[in-house]
Image: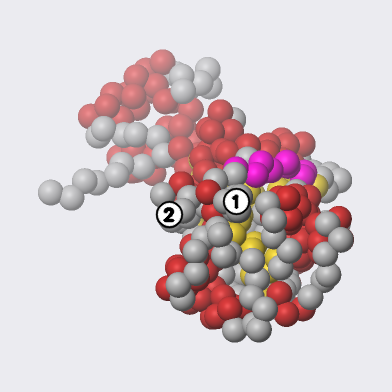
Amino acid sequence: MEKVHVSLKDLAKELKISISSVSRALKNHPDISPELAQKVQELARQKNYKPNPYAIRLLKHESKTIGIVIPDIVTYFYASVISGIESYTKEKGYSIVISSSQESYQKEQNIIENLLNLRVDGLIVCLSQETADYKHFDKILEDNTPLVFFDRVCRTSEISSVVADNFEAARNVTRHFYENGCTRIAFINGPNHLNISKERLAGYIEGLKDCGLKISNDLLASCNMTPEGAKVATQKLLALKVKPDAILSINDTVAFSAMKEVKRRGYKIPDDIAFVGFTDEFHASIVDPELTSVMHPTFEMGQEAARLLINQLESKTPGTPRQVVMKTTLVVRDSSIKKQKK
């Protein structure tokens, strides 16, 4: 049997009084006589009336709901960020709605439109890798809807964001390779328009300068951050007359695929080619050899993004955009430590 939801309107119709009178009677408002209040409350019990918190919030022009837009929902990186967001929002009395763009610009646009139609109070967004046009955020800014970016960001002069220190992390990785005997250090980057690609590339180049190494375009490859794209980028590097002896990857997914291709070609990791990834996914400690990776404070990034957004909500104003940069940690494992030759 289908469960029927009883509304204030249903109670009012049966009692032949106004909806506002029913609402006040249920709250024992002094404007309502005790007799009517008792009558309304008794009918509510009989009909098993339950208040709809979402409807109540809409009447107050607030949903106490925050929309989250991420590139995917299966990666540990995003799952951990969401955990951080949820821990803070729950403490503040907010719910979250999570949607995945699946790395699609069009889906990202559609999701944001749908979330706004649901009347979420604000948005926390990580851009898809296809997103190079940011016009779909114009209406959000015009309507003063609170918005915060994390990891992959844009328009930082207008919108608050939380990111990792990508420049310094990539610089440290490059120096780590050099300290372990690597001199032909390659970099498989992501799409050129993404901030993480630009910042990590700049850090990689600075690291080469620190070590007195030549900057070579031959050692630079880019991909769409899919396993197939990473495989093609790796093949390009392995086709060089003088092959790289180390590869820094834009993220762990790219590193896993690159490592697989390198091993398929008969090279040993790390003796022939050392590897470091970014984001320190769960599988980094399971692959063989275990992958050295840059660990992000993902849970804390989520908490900070939620804090920035709720501060906007509670102050009722966008305020001055804040850019929070969080430190990373290089987790050293077997993939980047070359054996000392006797």
Label 2 Cα crowd, 10 Å radius (few <14 / some 14-19 / many 20+): few
Amino acid under disc 1: Lys
Q: Which residue is mark 2?
A: 287
Q: Are marks 1 and 2 in contact (CB under 8 Å)?
A: no
Q: Position of residue 144 (x, y in %)?
A: 75, 53
Find out whether residue 325 is within the magenta segment: yes
Say above or below: 211 vs 242.
Answer: above
Counting other residues with Cα less than 10 Å from the Cα at mark 1, is it few (<14), some (14-19), or many (20 or more)?
few
Q: Amino acid at mark 2?
A: Val
Which stretch appears magenta?
Answer: 324-331
Q: Earlier in the sequence, mark 1 or mark 2?
A: 2
For image coordinates 46% across by 76% down, the residue present is 265
The residue drawn where x is 80% and y is 47% is: 323
Question: Principal SS element in the magenta part?
Answer: strand
The image position of residue 32, as x and y in percent, is: 47, 22
Q: Disc 1 designates what residue? A: 342
Q: Position of residue 59 (x, y in %)?
A: 56, 43
The answer to whether residue 67 is visible is: no
Asked if residue 26 shows in the view, the reply is yes
